[in-house]
């Protein structure tokens, strides 16, 4: 970053970090009308589920506030909503796949 930054606007230091270091790099181009899209995101399956959901929600809120597009890394697999093999998720069976309903519901809210 160029050292110019607006004062902190989030009480959560983790969300403030995401804004400054990850999403914030797109602030100037977006002010000039350039559309920004996060093409890959999502913590891998060894991240505790509650932390994963909190991180995803922080990202999704920041993207929504800035009208940014986004996509998750995978539908199925270690970062996806299905068949991620997390040990701390109560999966729902969906057509033979292990569905993380809590994660899916979070993504659908945004």
Image: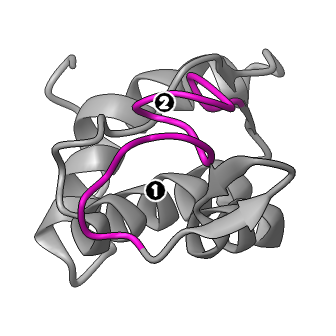
Near mark 1 (Cα within 10 A), the count class, few <14, some 14-19 or many ≥20, is: some
**Residue stretch rendered in magenta on the structure:** 71-89
Q: Is residue 107 visible?
A: yes
Q: Is residue 6 left or right of residue 37?
A: left
Residue at position x 79%, y 46% from top?
A: 67
Quadrant of residue 64 within the rendered picture: bottom right
Q: Are marks 1 and 2 in contact (CB under 8 Å)?
A: yes
The numbered dot on residue 41 is: 2
C-alpha gap between disc 1 and disc 2: 8 Å
Q: Is residue 93 above or below residue 80?
A: below
Q: Nearer the viewer, residue 3 or 67?
A: 67
Helix, strand or loop status at disc 1: helix
Q: Is residue 2 above or below residue 69?
A: above
- x%, y% of residue 110? 78, 63
- N-terminal label among 1 and 2: 2
Q: How many marks?
A: 2
Near mark 2 (Cα within 10 A), the count class, few <14, some 14-19 or many ≥20, is: some
Quadrant of residue 87 within the rendered picture: bottom left
Farthest front residue in view: 96
Q: Is residue 75 magenta?
A: yes
Q: Is residue 1 left or right of residue 69?
A: left
Q: Nearer the viewer, residue 61 or 77?
A: 77
Residue holding disc 1: 56
- x%, y% of residue 35? 80, 20
Residue at position x 40%, y 35% from top?
A: 24
Q: Is residue 5 visible?
A: no
């Amino acid at each position: 970053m160029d050292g110019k930054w607006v004062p902190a606007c989030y009480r959560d230091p983790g969300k403030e970090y995401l804004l400054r270091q990850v999403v914030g790099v797109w602030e100037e181009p977006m002010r000039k009308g350039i559309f920004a899209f996060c093409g890959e995101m999502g913590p891998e399956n060894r991240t505790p589920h509650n932390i994963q959901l909190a991180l995803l929600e922080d990202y999704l809120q920041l993207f929504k506030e800035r009208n940014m597009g986004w996509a998750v890394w995978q539908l199925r697999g270690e970062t996806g909503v299905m068949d991620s093999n997390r040990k701390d998720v109560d999966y729902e069976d969906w057509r033979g796949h292990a569905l993380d309903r809590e994660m899916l519901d979070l993504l659908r809210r945004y």
